[in-house]
Image (spheres, coloured by chain):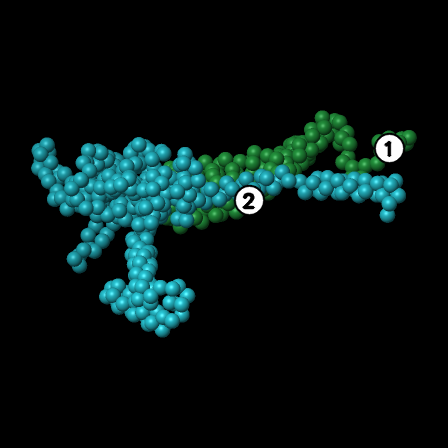
Amino acid sequence: MGELQHDMDGGRRIDRDFAGEDIRFRAKIISSEYAGKCIELINKYDLSHSCKITLIDLVAANFDPNAVLARTENVSMRIIKFQVALIIAVTAMDFSDTSNPGLLNITQSMTDAFGDFISRSIGGKERDAITKIETHSSSHYSGLNPQPEQRGIQLPNIGGRRQQ
Amino acid sequence: MRFLAEIIIPAAGAVLLCIVVFLMKGVLSFVIGLPVWMIAIAGILAGVVIFIQLNLLTAFFRYGREGFTFMEARRKGMLVICDVEVGTNNAEFILGEKTDPKSPLFKDEKSGVKVDPSMISAYSEPMRFPGGLNIVGYAYRDMLPQTTKNHLGVKAIIQYFRNGEETPDRIDPEDKTGKKKIVHPAKTLAFLTDNEKFELIRKPEHFLEVDLKTKLGSYFKTKEVTDGQDKRVIYYRQFQKDGKWFEQTVEVPELINAVQSMKADINKLPIAMDCYFSMTEAFKNNNSAFTAQHVSALKSLLTQLITEDIMSKVNLWTYGLIGMGILAVFFGGVFVLIKFTGKG
């Protein structure tokens, strides 16, 4: 453990690949694939320019990885705030935008997707898990032997020998 | 109906009263101690007075119910809201009551939130009637009213569109070939609806090109034209008129110019003050997307948010434990008291 492993033929560092994979996986967890697709869809609809700007801004702000990493105590409150933002966004729209059925469709999908996306941030579990994994990996790669995570009820070790 | 209501029914009532009095003359004279004719006249007079009052009140309720709203508004110095349904043209007078005189919102929110214009704008003159009655017109979907000037302004703009569409093209005097024609901007944009033209007029200049292209996409197809080495995109559509097929082509710069000159013309357009106007027509052409219903939805969402916030702070487990503790202390105290006093 802690030693660098080399690929037989190419000499590539496999551990680095795995580390990259791990980072990619974590990045995938905290980001939303929907955001990109939604922005693409918004641009395809016959909406006014100011409406598109506003919707894209809403998607970018609310589907940001920071939204998942935040400590959300109440998901329904967060969804209500998103709906409030959607209503306020109407001030930047035209009458032809609000009478476009596509807008209704896209805002409904955005609300549903946001609910699923933000549900991972309840109590900051995602953030804590990532911090824990990060600390574990760092200590592992820097040669330290991290304590394995102990499960179950922890009883005080009185008078006994500390388990190594 | 009027003859029946105002002559036959009171006359029949008076005759009925006379018969009743005549039949009961012995009893009545004995009890009251007055001659029977005097009781009959008094009874008829009382009946007539009560009937007139009732008739008047019924007529008010049936045919002049707005009178009560106006009466109340004059008495309390309040605004009267004329709430118009754009689709059906139905309208209703509502008293502009408020929970607080300084609140910018009216109490009535049945058709969405309504804002008192006098609190937020200096250009919101209500229609003033004699005796201190002020009326403001709202559409069901608008949170702000439109004044008479607004209605006339909208009418002037619509009139500009119509006149422009009918204006014949004229030859440009500055063009030496004599072939270049000057087309009225409203005629160039005649394929758009009035609402779409209104939208384009209020657009910022830097959004105009993109928005025009979006709107053109609904009516025209695109094709690329090569002019020497330059390639440009033109928009075209085919349509049938009088049994013949025509092809119309437009280019975005031409349309941008049309919108810009239309904007400049409308800025200078005087408000027509010597014509009739339709409140509903003006409301119909108001293309503001943010409606009174949006404000109502926003209000209910914010209320929900506050409720959620309060509920999240109420930790039932903690309060339950505190309650149990208080109960335990109380019963413990009672038990100790009974034990030491020796009663029970």
Residue type indicated by callout 1: Asn
Residue B141 visible at all = yes
Foreground residue, B32 or B187?
Answer: B32
Task: Return the residue at label 1.
Answer: A157
Q: Chain B's shade in the image?
A: cyan
Chain letter for mark 1, please: A
The answer to whether B326 appears left or right of B14 in the picture is right
Residue B337 screen position, x and y as percent:
84, 40
The answer to whether B170 appears left or right of B47 in the picture is left
**Chain letter, colour green:** A
Picture residue at 27% right of the left edge, 49% below the top: B280
Q: Relative to B85, is B17 above or below?
A: below
In the picture as drawn, the residue positioned furthest to the bottom comes out as B23
Q: Secondary structure at mark 2?
A: helix
Task: Return the residue at label 2.
Answer: A115
Picture residue at 88% right of the left edge, 43% below the top: B342
Q: Relative to A25, is B94 above or below?
A: below
Q: Secondary structure at mark 1?
A: loop
Foreground residue, A22 or B108?
Answer: B108
Q: Residues within 10 Å of mark 1 (few under 14, many from 20)?
A: few
Give the quarter of the figure containing the N terminus of chain A. Answer: top right
Residue B259 screen position, x and y as percent:
24, 37
Indicate which disc, 1 or 2, sits on the residue closer to the N terminus.
Answer: 2
The answer to whether B171 appears left or right of B203 in the picture is left
Picture residue at 76% right of the left edge, 36% below the top: A149
Chain letter for mark 2, please: A
